[in-house]
Image: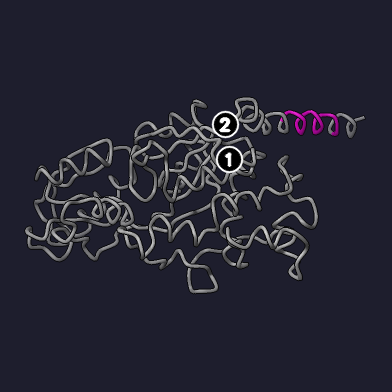
Amino acid sequence: MQKSVILGAMTVAAFSAGAAAAATLDDVKARGKLNCGVSTSLVGFAAPDANGNWEGFDVAVCRAVAAAVFGDSKAVEFVPTTGKTRFTALASGEVDMLARNTTWTYSRDTDLKFDFIGVNYYDGQGFMVPKSLGVSSAKELNGSTVCIQTGTTTELNLADFFRANNITYTPVPIETNAEALQQYLAGACDTYTTDASGLAASRATFETPTDHIVLPEIISKEPLGPLVRHGDNDWADIVRWSLNVMIAAEELGVTSANVAELSAAPTTNPEINRLLGTEGEMGKMMGVDNAFAKNIIMQVGNYGEVFEKNIGASTSIGLARGLNAQWTDGGLLYTPPFR
């Protein structure tokens, strides 16, 4: 009798959990589009072009999820969020996911009840200064004014760094990257601090980028990645494996140029076959089409393609792969197998 009660309770719990997990996917499908929280504007990562079309490295993650769910990477509504508003937007359901250079931390994962589903950019906090300031190290910034976005990990990192080096600073709080750049270029602060990738992206937009330098110190670990709400495991799986598709595709040599050919018939590589849906039913396991990975790669590209197009060495931002290279090339990119 007791065993039956326990099994009954487990069945009810499992059913309830399953119902909760399906909620976001059902809502997204019923709406006909994905609501994705992005930065207000950070060139190379998330910004609208002259025609109002959003593009960038983080934007590509949103488009990958839309391609997985709808088979259409354009089925996305981009919702600009600041460092202060992003978590409220996600928790309230205004957006279905965030993809906006957000650092994976303990408290955000646990106390704020979010699930980070992976890392799409390994970064660290740095400092940008005008060359005319005459400093070559962040340790020479004693007594400086610092532009810093509120509601971010950079606030705490900044305080820790200056305290550890026994130097002082005056914060100039701002809410958006655009506001920070305006204040920085107007001379309201001596230095701007944020993720080093963000500094490179911002510097590339300046009229004379060479008048500004990014100092050598990287003062923190900033694993940046997409996140969803707690308690929705099915949805988290879709977002997680959409990102993993792009990373795995690069490792396996599957690109937007050859994916149609490779998916026309099974290849000699079983993992490529499983990835592209010519073998097994990987998509069905998540409630999406078995061709979900093919759609992502064809419409968005693999990780390497997305990186080089938006922020790579050939762009004005000019970021090297570094830690964001594949594990086979000495980087940190590594996905679980598609098996």
Identify the residue position indicated by label 1 in the image.
Answer: 66
Residue in view at x 37 percent, y 39 percent: 48
Looking at the picture, the colour scheme in use is one colour
Q: Is residue 62 magenta?
A: no
Position of 231 relative to 193 (above/below): above
The region drawn magenta spans 7-16
Q: Is residue 11 in the magenta section?
A: yes
Residue for point 79% across, 50% down: 281
Locate residue 128 relative to residue 93 in the image: left or right: left
Report x, y in % for residue 141: 13, 57
User: Of 206 and 191, which appears nearest the observer?
Assistant: 206
The kind of residue tagged 2 is Lys
Question: Crowding at label 1, few (<14), some or many (≥20) Cα neighbours within 10 Å?
Answer: many
Tell me whether circle 2 and circle 1 mark residues in contact (CB < 8 Å): yes
Where the C terminus falls, by quadrant? bottom right
Q: Residue at x 22, y 56 (%)?
A: 127
Q: Could you say whether the residue bearing mark 1 is in a helix, strand or loop?
A: helix
x and y percentages locating residue 222 in the rendered image: 39, 54
Circle 2 crowding by C-alpha within 10 Å: few under 14, some 14–19, many from 20? some
The residue to which callout 2 is attached is 33
Magenta portion: prevailing SS class: helix
